[in-house]
Image (cartoon, rainbow, N blue to C red):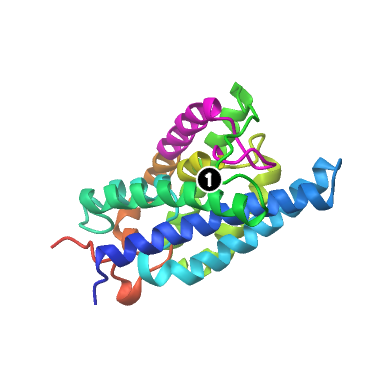
Amino acid sequence: MTIALPRRLLAEFAGTALLVTAVVGSGIMAATLSPGDVGLQLLENSIATAFALGVLILMFGPVSGAHFNPVVSVADWWLGRRSGTGLTAADLAGYLAAQVLGGIAGAVLANLMFGLTAVSFAGTDRTGGHLWLGEVVATAGLVLLIFALARSGRATVAPAAVGAYIGAAYWFTSSTSFANPAVTVGRAFTDTFAGIAPGSVPGFVVAQVVGLAVGVGLLAALYPDAGAAADQVVVPADDQATGSRRP
């Protein structure tokens, strides 16, 4: 059974939107409930995000694979080219558009839920070599984790593993682990705890692309045939088909 592209794009849009809603909404709630304690705010934000990500992968994974992240989708297309697995170039374009639009929609939804202006561009500058290095580390680790799980036949634990990794990376990276261009763009649309100033977005996205390259390089060294499992990323869709497998 294959799954039609519109269904998969809807899943990617909705999943990414709800992920950003969880990130932004829990940040707003944390700042409200724990004013003046940034460490506690970050703890509350990271826990909510980790749990939400795991649940969303379970919810939408059977339809689209639950990428919710342009970095993951690009890696899936790139690694699956030779073995005829994963996304096609046409599907990749659709996934990227759905994810970015979903990220923006999720920020708008969170703003509205908390009685804020629908769009309020963030004023929090996040720039500097140490933050970009943090994004490289966070993104490379995420790519390596997801494809290592798929190649070793452990994709079923991806919801828990990916949620745990992102929750931990909030704390061990200097950037608090955005690790996702669509989420980064979405968070520019909210001037709240989780926001990032629009002028800081390009630096983060470039760092995430570098992290993608590092992650793919590590996969090539550690799992040379990782592309064969591209259809299993992040989790397999129904009948292990994404509707994009090439003959």
What secondary structure is the stretch in magenta mostly built from? Answer: helix
Mark 1 falls on what kind of element? helix
Magenta stretch holds residue 198: yes
Of residues 93 and 154, which is closer to you in this image? 93
Q: Is residue 59 left or right of residue 39?
A: left
Residue 139 visible from this viewpoint: yes
* Tally of marks: 1
In the rendered image, residue 156, in percent from the top left (x then y), is placed at: 48, 71
Residue 151 visible from this viewpoint: no
- Within 10 Å of the Cα at label 1, are there few (<14), some (14-19), or many (20+) other Cα atoms? many
163 vs 123: above or below: below
Q: Amino acid at mark 1?
A: Gly
Q: Residue furthest left?
A: 247
Where is mark 1, residue-wise? 141
Q: Residue furthest top?
A: 128
Seen at 53% across and 59% down, the residue is: 18
In the rendered image, residue 120, in percent from the top left (x then y), is placed at: 59, 38
Q: Is residue 43 left or right of residue 202?
A: right
Task: State the quadrant of the N terminus.
Answer: bottom left
Among the 4 quarters of the image, the one containing residue 188: top right
Seen at 46% across and 41% down, the residue is: 181
Seen at 63% across and 49% down, the residue is: 24
In the rendered image, residue 76, in percent from the top left (x then y), is placed at: 34, 52
Q: Is residue 6 left or right of residue 160?
A: left
Among the 4 quarters of the image, the one containing residue 178: top right
- The magenta span reads 188-214
Seen at 55% across and 54% down, the residue is: 109
Task: State the quadrant of the C terminus.
Answer: bottom left
